[in-house]
Amino acid sequence: MREKRLLLWDIDGTLINTGAAGQHALVRATVERFGGKGELDGVEIAGRTDTAIAHQILEKYRTPLSDENVNSFLDLYVQLLEEELPRRKGRVLPGIRELVEDSSHQEHNTLGLLTGNLRRGAQLKLEYYELWKFFPFGAFSDDNHDRNALGPCALGRALAETAIDFSPTHVDVIGDTGHDIACGKAFGARTIAVATGSWSRERLAEHRPDFLFDDLGNVDEVKRILGW
C-alpha cells in the first residue's frame, strides 16, 4: 500500500496567475485609504501573508498597526479583489488542473492549502478559476501573519478533516517562492519549488528545495518524480 501524503499548495504563482488582481486590489485599497497613487515601493508581496503585507503598507503610510486598522484595510482589499479578478487576464498554471483533479481522486493523496492569502481571498481566487472545490481545508493568513507558523496549523486542520495525523515527513509543501520553501522546512516537510511565479529558478535553487521544477506541465513526469 502506498504511503498517504498530504499535499499543501500555495496559490499565487503556484496554482494560478491572477493577472496581478491581488496587487491591483492592494494599490486601489491604498489609494482609497491613504490617497495619492497607491505607491507600494519597498513593500514585499510575493510569498508574504496578506496580514504581513497590510502591516508593511500601514507602516509605509505611518499608520498604527492596531487590529482595527489592519482588519479595515484587509476588508477593503478583499472587496476590491472580487472586482479585480474578472478584469485581469489570469490563468490556471501548467499541469495544475490535471494534477489536483487527479490527486483529489486518489486515496493516498490528501489536498490542502498552505497560503499567505486570507481565507476569503483564497476562496475568491480559486472559485473564480474553478479550483476551490478540490481543497477542503487549509492554513491561511487569518491563522497567523508569520508564514512559518502556518505548517502546524495545516497539520491540525488535516487531522480534523481526515482523522489522519500526518507526520511532517509525509507532507509536501508546493510553492513558488523562497518563503514557501522556508515555511515547509520550518516544520520538516518535503519542499517542492516551481518557477512559475516571480522568483527565478536560480533564486529558488539558492533556498535548497527538495525538488525544483520550471513548471508542472509534464504531469506524468512530475507524478513519477514525486511519487504522487
Image: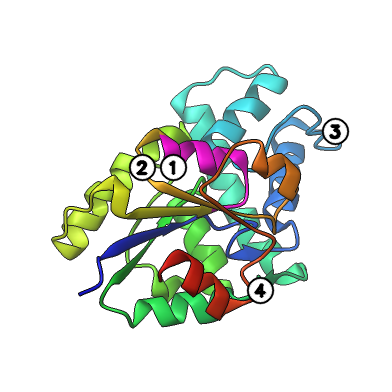
Q: Quadrant of residue 5?
A: bottom left
* CB-based contact (under 8 Å), mark 2 and mark 3: no
Residue drawn at x 25%, y 72% as measured from the top left: 2
Q: Secondary structure at mark 1?
A: helix
Q: Position of residue 122 (x, y in %)?
A: 50, 58
Q: What residue type is disc 3 on?
A: Gly
Q: Which residue is mark 1?
A: 184
Circle 3 — which element?
Answer: loop
Q: For the point 59% across and 33% down, which residue is it?
A: 54
Of marks 1 and 4, which one's residue comes earlier in the chain? 4
Q: What residue sits 72% from the left and 49% below the top?
A: 201
Q: Is residue 182 magenta?
A: yes
The residue indicated by pointer 2 is: 151
Q: Of label 2 and label 4, which has the lower sequence position?
A: 4
Disc 1, disc 4: CB below 8 Å?
no
Q: Which mark is in front, 2 or 1?
A: 1
Q: Earlier in the sequence, mark 3 or mark 4?
A: 3
Q: Is residue 48 visible?
A: no
Closer to us: mark 3 or mark 4? 4
* Amino acid at pointer 4: Pro
Judge left or right: residue 151 versus residue 129. left
N-term mark: 2 or 1: 2
Left or right: 202, with 165 as reference point: right
**In whole angstroms, how far apart are the C-alphas of marks 3 and 4?**
37 Å
Q: Amino acid at mark 1?
A: Gly
Where disc 4 sits, the SS reads loop
- What's the magenta region? 175-185
Residue 17 is left or right of residue 180, and the answer is right
Q: In the rendered image, which residue does mark 4 sit on?
A: 94
